[in-house]
Image (cartoon, helix red, strand yellow):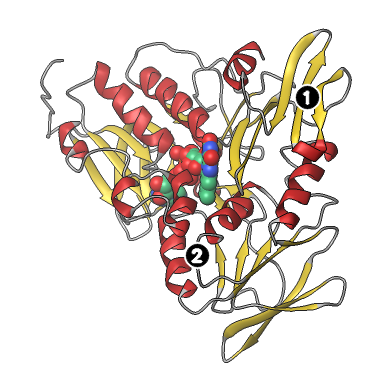
């Protein structure tokens, strides 16, 4: 590969907002084709890029902090990137081709990538700002939870989705945690990922392992004492004593910085197949970007790590003048809870053409394919996850 020959006097270059899956993939793709133009990576998190999905494993001690980092410590020097970590972009001046920094000043760009990901939805009830209420999205969140765990015996998980279930599976390895309660407003846990039958197997499995799962229930208030959490009150009128609440109510794309920029948004940022927005030269990728949905048609956010990497790479190539197309994404989630593996991909919640290959609830085995017009559009595997890779490529 040609050595870097960065023109430090150039007035503008590439700016990437976001130092995670999409941002890093884009930076690497840019440097495959352009070793000269300045490249700046801005992120409001203060540290080098890390594996966000690993943060729940940090809670349970399955990985150490050293194992979280995505790239070697000298990565940014090696790709000739200026880093502006711990700094927030307040706005994008698309007409003036510059990003406006929260702390004052601006950075000019020739090509811009918005890879700002998402932020957790907050719990909209009284007491949600008490000490002991957490989300799990960033390394800072994990660190704060770890510190608070020292004085925690009972945990309430608000929501029964993937992130709270991952937190549950991590906290079972924490000796001081004696009780976990999962409060889910829907009729079953993991309802965004699984159909009712599969979700029922997982839910029963959680209960058998001692988790108090309450469905069709919400948290009405977080109760406190001296500014700290002492419990929650549910919609059923029960009070559950606890020292910690972990909220997992979904993620909202970080689009606030686009206000007034003229960049088109729907739920996320609307992109074309090249990951470009409606503003030429401005691209988007990852959890903030809306992309073609291969399974259901239309566009949607495909909020998983591999999709963010692929989209970031496509964006980076196009930014550097090497044409590339992102053909669309298939959502896929794979996890293991209390030793039981589950994988869901594509359309997992049915519609027409459901085919159950195997159903053995007593053994916690469930395998379902979802077909549309004879074509595989999704699958769920619980217990026996063989052939998941092959099935995914067939969707
Ligand atoms: C606990 C947990 C478990 C997960 N498990 C899995 C899993 O098992 N499998 C899977 O595929 N996915 C998983 N995910 C999802 C995965 O982490 C995301 O899909 C992925 O991180 C998206 O990457 P991204 O680059 O789009 O954005 P993000 O990782 O969200 O990063 C956004 C970046 O933008 C920066 N930023 C945001 N706003 C600004 C601003 N205004 N100014 C400057 N910088 C800004 C942030 O500092 C950050 O660097 C998990 C996520 C969590 C939280």
Position of residue 232 in the picture relative to residue 311 (left or right): right
Give the residue number, with chain letter if any, for mark 2.
174
Q: Residue furthest front?
A: 363
Q: Quadrant of the C terminus?
A: top right
- The percent position of residue 144, horizontal first and vertical second, equals 44, 68
Residue shown at the point (61%, 49%) measured from the top left: 338
- Find residue 271 and report its image quarter: top right
Q: Nearer the viewer, residue 395 or 249?
A: 395
Q: Which label sits on residue 368?
A: 1
Residue shown at the point (53%, 56%) measured from the top left: 170
Up-down relation of residue 190 to residue 65 (above or below): above
- Does the rendering let one see residue 303? yes
Which secondary structure lies at badge 1? strand
Position of residue 47 in the picture relative to residue 392 (left or right): left
- The percent position of residue 32, horizontal first and vertical second, equals 26, 18
Position of residue 334 in the picture relative to residue 141 (left or right): right
Residue shown at the point (37%, 24%) measured from the top left: 316
- Find residue 354 and report its image quarter: top right
Mark 1, Cα crowd under 10 Å, few <14 / some 14-19 / many 20+, is many
- Does the rendering let one see residue 259? no
Label 1 beta carbon less than 8 Å to ligand 1: no
Residue shown at the point (57%, 19%) measured from the top left: 389
């Amino acid at each position: 590969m040609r050595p870097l020959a960065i023109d430090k006097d150039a007035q503008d270059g590439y700016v990437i907002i976001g130092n995670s899956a999409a941002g890093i993939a884009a930076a690497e793709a840019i440097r495959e084709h352009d070793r000269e133009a300045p490249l700046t990576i801005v992120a409001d998190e203060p540290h080098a890029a890390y594996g966000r999905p690993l943060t729940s494993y940090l809670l349970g001690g399955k990985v150490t902090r050293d194992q979280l980092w995505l790239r070697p410590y000298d990565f940014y020097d090696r790709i000739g990137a200026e880093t502006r970590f711990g700094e927030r972009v307040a706005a994008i001046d698309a007409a003036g081709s510059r990003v406006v920094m929260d702390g004052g000043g601006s950075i000019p760009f020739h090509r811009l990538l918005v890879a700002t990901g998402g932020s957790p939805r907050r719990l909209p009830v009284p007491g949600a700002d008490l000490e002991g209420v957490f989300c799990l999205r960033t390394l800072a969140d994990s660190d704060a939870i770890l510190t608070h765990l020292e004085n925690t015996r009972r945990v309430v998980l608000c929501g029964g989705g993937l992130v709270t279930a991952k937190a549950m599976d991590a906290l079972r390895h924490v000796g001081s945690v004696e009780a976990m309660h999962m409060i889910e407003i829907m009729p079953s846990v993991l309802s965004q990922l699984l159909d009712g039958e599969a979700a029922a197997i997982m839910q029963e499995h959680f209960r058998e392992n001692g988790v108090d799962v309450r469905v069709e229930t919400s948290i009405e208030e977080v109760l406190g004492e001296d500014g700290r959490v002492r419990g929650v009150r549910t919609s059923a009128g029960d009070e559950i004593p606890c020292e910690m609440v972990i909220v997992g109510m979904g993620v909202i794309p970080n689009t606030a910085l686009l206000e007034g920029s003229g960049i088109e948004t729907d739920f996320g940022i609307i992109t074309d197949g090249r990951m470009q927005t409606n503003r030429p030269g401005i691209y988007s990728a990852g959890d903030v970007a809306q992309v073609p949905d291969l399974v259901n048609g239309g566009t949607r956010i495909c909020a998983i790590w591999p999709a963010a990497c692929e989209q970031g790479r496509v964006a980076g190539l196009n930014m550097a003048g090497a044409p590339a197309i992102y053909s669309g994404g298939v959502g896929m989630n794979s996890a293991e809870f209390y030793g039981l593996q589950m994988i869901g991909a594509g359309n997992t919640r049915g519609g027409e053409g459901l085919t159950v290959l195997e159903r053995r609830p007593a053994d916690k085995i469930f395998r379902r394919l979802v077909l549309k017009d004879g074509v595989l559009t999704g699958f769920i595997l619980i217990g026996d996850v063989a052939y998941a890779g092959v099935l995914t490529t067939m969707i």
